[in-house]
Image (cartoon, grey):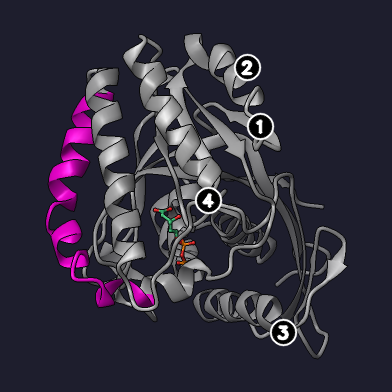
Amino acid sequence: MSHGLHSALARANANIAFIKYWGNRDDELRLPANSSLSMTLEGLFAQTAVTWQSTADDTFVLNGQQQTGEPLRRVSAHLDVLRRRLSLDARAHVESHNNFPTGAGIASSAAAFAALTVAGVAAAGAALDERELTMLARLGSGSASRSIPAGFVEWHAGTSHEESYAESIFPPDYWDLVDVIAVVSREHKPVGSTAGHRSAVTSDLQAARVAGADRRLNLCKEAIAARDFPRFAQIVELDSNLMHAVMMTSDPPLFYWQPASLTIMNLVRQWRAEGLRVCYTLDAGPNVHCICLAEDASVIAERLRAIPQVIEIFSARPGNKAHVVSIP
Ligand code: DP6
């Protein structure tokens, strides 16, 4: 590594899955049980600076707070992945900022591990292709693989490290969708995704969900290709409901929905029946992602704002790919 060129700042957007990732065939390699499909979310990002240096330990500062314990261990484990790939033995100082709440159903780990991967590679002066960046990000957090490419993204499950990668299937401007996120809780989720993935197999419903995942993914892809909102809405809501059915029937059972989540889901279906182009999807948290056509986004946001349990609203269009912001 040449002197003075061992630092880089990168930014990666979060993403929302339309066809969900839940459960792994290999937990270590984060090889998922099924392929998934998502939209990258413009403006909901993690921005991360990595500096490779000759100190004794890795250090990690998140939103201005020095991290220890599990968050530091997980970042350090991902730095090990990068060190192995880049043949580095330096330690790293990592400084990261999110501009959205951590651990509340907006995939903060996705943006975080995508930005960490892009910054870590650039800081080492290496240039890897996008496919390999998605594979490396996947080892940090599965959904992070989908936060590397732009727009509408498919993560191919694969059965080996090299085959499990994500790619953009439609550019951001292909379809004017907006994710209007209704935040109903800011609390950190009681059971994180990593533990959740491990318990998915304990549900009798997981095998059926996985068996139908490719079929749903293809239907979703076709609906996006045709910009057919009714077909899109039907498959997105079905896939979210299937994942939550698995969660609720796992051992231990995981109930991520709050009463307010269900209230909003029912309203969204009612609004669609009235002619608004909107559907819902929820990740491992109670916040409701209302996916709508851009033309309907301001009406949806206004209606969500009028619901007393809604604390805050974020809106995001299809997003750009993860990228290096600066190399000092
Ligand atoms: C419910 O990617 O957060 O958001 O690989 O353990 O970090 P780890 O899991 P993560 O799981 C995301 C699960 C989900 C659905 C999805 O985004 O597809």
Q: Which residues are magenta?
A: 198-224
Of the residues under marks 4 and 3, which one precedes in the sequence?
3
Q: Provide the residue designation for mark 4.
A: 258
Viewer-nearest of discs 1 and 3 = 1
What residue is at 19 percent from the left and 64 percent from the top? 205
Q: Provide the residue designation for mark 1.
A: 313
Q: CA distance from mark 3 to mark 2?
A: 41 Å
Kindly report the secondary structure that dominates the magenta region of the rendered protein: helix
Q: Which mark is residue 34?
A: none
Which of the image's four quarters has the N terminus?
bottom right
Q: CA distance from mark 1 to mark 4?
A: 17 Å
Crowd class of label 4 (few under 14; some 14 to 19; many from 20; radius 10 Å): few
Q: Provide the residue designation for mark 2.
A: 302
How many numbered marks are there? 4
Q: Quadrant of ligand 1?
A: bottom left
- Residue type at tag 2: Glu
What residue is at 33 percent from the left and 51 percent from the top? 20
Please state if 249 lies on the left or on the right of 49 as rendered: left
Q: CA distance from mark 1 to mark 3?
A: 31 Å
Viewer-nearest of discs 1 and 2 = 2
Query: Can residue 29 be seen here?
Result: no
Residue 267 in percent (x, y) is at 44, 26
- Residue type at tag 1: Ile
Viewer-nearest of discs 4 and 3 = 4
